[in-house]
Image: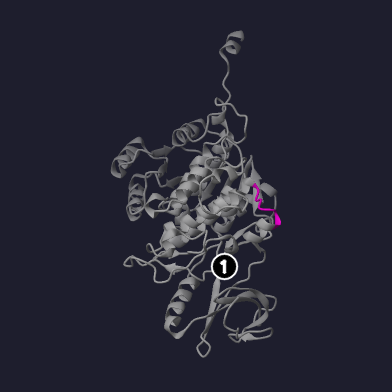
Amino acid sequence: MMKQPSQLEFGSIVGERYRIVRTLGSGGMSRVFMAEDLKLPGKQWAVKESVAGPQVMKLVRTEAEMLISLSHPRLPRIVDFFEHPPSGAVYLVMDYIEGITLEAYMKGYQGYIPQEQIVPFALQVLDVLDYLHTRQPPVIYRDLKPTNIMLTPEMEFILIDFGIARSYKAELDQDTVKLGTVGFAAPEQYGSGQTDARSDLYSLGALLLYLCTGGKYSEWTAGVEGYIRGELPRYLIPVIRKLLRQHPEERFQSAGEVIGELRHSADFQPAQQGISGNDASMDYAGTRVVAVLGVSAGSGATHTAIAVSHYLARRSRSVALVELHSTAKAFARLQEVVEGTSVGQSSSSRRFEVDGVHYWRQTSRADVISLLGGSYRFIVLDLGSGQDNERLEEFLRADYPLVVGSGAEWRVQDIVRLARSLQRHPQYKWNYCLPLATSEAVRRLRKELDHDKVFALPFHSDPFERDDEVDQVLDELFRGVIPDTRKKRFGFLKRQR
């Protein structure tokens, strides 16, 4: 319970706008209330009241400004901040998240969370940690635990309570304040060094172990393996073990590294038990992301994304093509054609289907994260030619980033300029496609970029239809990614003809 008496009660008004309705919870230094918005009837907010002495008020103010600057679908928005100097109280106004904490969910299901939800859950948490850790300066959460994760009725995970989050300061050797929850906090949070991104990754490991042992363990001790549920993917155990190393340098070094490991491990696991070794390569678990980015408007990004999606659908199953732009119009026009509606009269549903490919129009990043937890084998992101931070981040973290540039001789340098502008990012995974480019243009670009995955795309008027020449290029581009499931005729059948 909060030691100091609260300044708020039912009916109190904060900031001349938010009326307190009821108490949602309390801790050692704070209380959280539900409040109604007097300017937006029907809108509810969560108001967090904390007590800070004069000596730390400046620090609290700085942290509040940092939190207000954050924007991620798995973080509540911090929309307002108030101080009450006479009492030392400060107030943060944030999104009210309807749902229950992960801890309450676990108790309600006797310590059981469905095994097929654990890896998608881990990827969702890693996505928000990656967002926080790549801010400038990095934001370290420092209190990842079941009570600080909210589960919405739609089974969405939201990270809440930034009470002890801090900005990483490279010049410090240790944290000024040692805070965290025993059993989930990294060893360095108790005096052995400064917390950084690897501290949050330790907490993620503790959280995953907690889920995998039905809430029994969050620290790696002798014999803990015997309590890990037998039906869980076995590749999770070494990932959790590495996350829980005592020394930060022995752990994964970034959230992106863990994301890559989980996706890679999932890709090469048989989707169901009982598949023989010879057949295991034909079926994989996990979702792979192909991100298609145009160098400039009119370079053919959407056309290429459609062709790639239908190619993958013919070779595999469960392909989603996502238009990652809330104001784009291309998919809306296509949906009108598919559904036979009048111009401007697209269905309220943003999903429609063409030849087995699920199209998602005008999609947000939050929707993409949700799709990653589903059953799609491939998600193809049509990023258009925009390079705003959100779409650029999705391009950089994709399993198969694909740059589309004009094949015209005088436009090839556009790709070189893009690559150089992003040279601080690793580019070994990048692929380059040049519609209608000559073999000489491809050769020169490979040499200039010092990169062999540069391809010319032949003329292809209908990206929905199969074209042998285009398929040959895409076979090369995706070599080793998917099995070739095209039917082959047996020799004796040919001889019988």
Q: Report the side of 158 relative to 164 (left or right).
A: right
Quadrant for the N terminus, please.
Answer: bottom right
Residue most toward the bottom? 86
In this orientation, which residue lies closer to the viewer: 112 or 42?
A: 112
In the rendered view, tell whether residue 411 sits above or below residue 81.
above
Q: Report the side of 50 relative to 403 (left or right).
A: right
Q: Amino acid at mark 1?
A: Pro
- Say which element carries label 1: loop
Q: Is residue 298 visible?
A: no
Res 215 quadrant in image: bottom right
Q: Report the side of 425 relative to 308 (left or right).
A: left
Q: How is the image coloured?
A: one colour
Tell me the chief SS of the magenta region.
loop
Magenta-tinted stretch: 108-114
- Is-magenta flag for residue 248? no
- In percent of width and height, residue 90 lies at 53, 82
Res 193 quadrant in image: bottom left
Q: Residue at x 46, y 46 (%)?
A: 260
Q: Residue at x 65, y 86 (%)?
A: 12
Q: Which residue is mark 1?
A: 76
In this orientation, which residue lies closer to the viewer: 403 or 154?
A: 154
Residue most toward the top? 496
- In percent of width and height, residue 65 lies at 46, 75
